[in-house]
Image: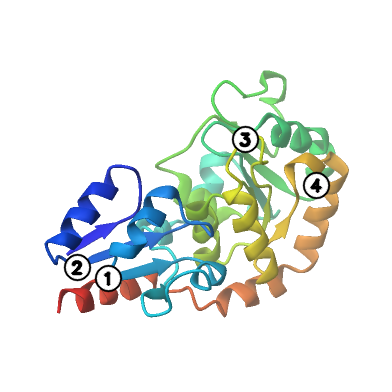
Amino acid sequence: VIFSKGGFVTVPVVKAASRQKVPCVLHESDISPGLANRLCIPSATAICANFPETIANLPEDKAYLTGTPIRSELFSGNRLKGLDFCGFTANKPVILVIGGSLGSVRVNEAVREILPKLLEKYQVIHLCGKDKVDESLKQTEGYVQFEYIQKELCDLLDAADLVISRAGANAICELLALHKPNILIPLSLEASRGDQILNAASFEKQGFSYVIKEEELTSEKLLAAITSVDENKETYKQAMSQSNQQDAVVKVADIIEKACK
């Protein structure tokens, strides 16, 4: 059996496997399938999707809503370790800002503009991207900046009460799996093919997220969004807990196993 997550190198593999009668299972994380998966769909035995909207545009006899498999270590985070790593107290809630692998100047600026107001109530962990640390804020109590975090990310996520993030499929599915109230700021059409905008819209429609378009982002809108999500955090958690996109690993494994028979 072939299991493919997409990417241009997978197309000849899936096509060749299909000609040899080898079953092929595809997985599409984004709401709008990428070019490689679109080319492979006719040759696929089954297609696993992450969003209900994706299912509606796939062959009914092949499509399954599974969600995206989440790495198991994500669930091993320790809140106290995360707080200790940042030098934070357990007495104030924590906002985690994730600007993507390269960071976001616009998101960084909006967060820093309202930082004095945020620190009245919250502690802030800011993953701001390479070369985007603000040296003038390094000694600010209750605010820590990192260019990038890998090993400790699980602990920081566990410590977070609210997350501000881009809307890449894997990132938002991790927030869904962890039931983290969140604000999504998807990449604009100028910087992407628009998949993050569609991903975020779906999560907003399902009641999982509050969305701010990047081109409409201001510090005032961000502060209002934080207040709204904080006030309604239990509603967001309830919606995420009722999602049918849990146990994605088991669902995908079952589909692969059935394809082999």
Residue to which mark 1 is pinned: 45
Q: Residue at x 51, y 41 (%)?
A: 85
Crowd around label 1: few <14 · some 14–19 · many ≥20 (10 Å): many
User: At which x and y percent is residue 239?
Assistant: 64, 76
**How far is disc 1 from disc 3 in space, using C-alphas?**
33 Å
**Amino acid at the residue labelled 2:** Pro
User: At which x and y percent is residue 31?
Assistant: 53, 60
Looking at marks 3 and 2 on the same chain, the residue that comes earlier in the sequence is marked by 2
User: At which x and y percent is residue 43?
Assistant: 28, 63
**Amino acid at the residue labelled 1:** Thr
Name the secondary structure under disc 3: loop
Q: Quadrant of residue 71?
A: bottom left
**Amino acid at the residue labelled 3:** Ala
Q: Residue at x 35, y 51 (%)?
A: 6
Looking at marks 4 and 2 on the same chain, the residue that comes earlier in the sequence is marked by 2
Name the secondary structure under disc 4: helix
Up/down of 139 relative to 191, above or below = above
Residue to which mark 4 is pinned: 222
Looking at marks 1 and 2 on the same chain, the residue that comes earlier in the sequence is marked by 2
Name the secondary structure under disc 2: loop
Which label sits in the foreground, 4 or 1?
Answer: 1
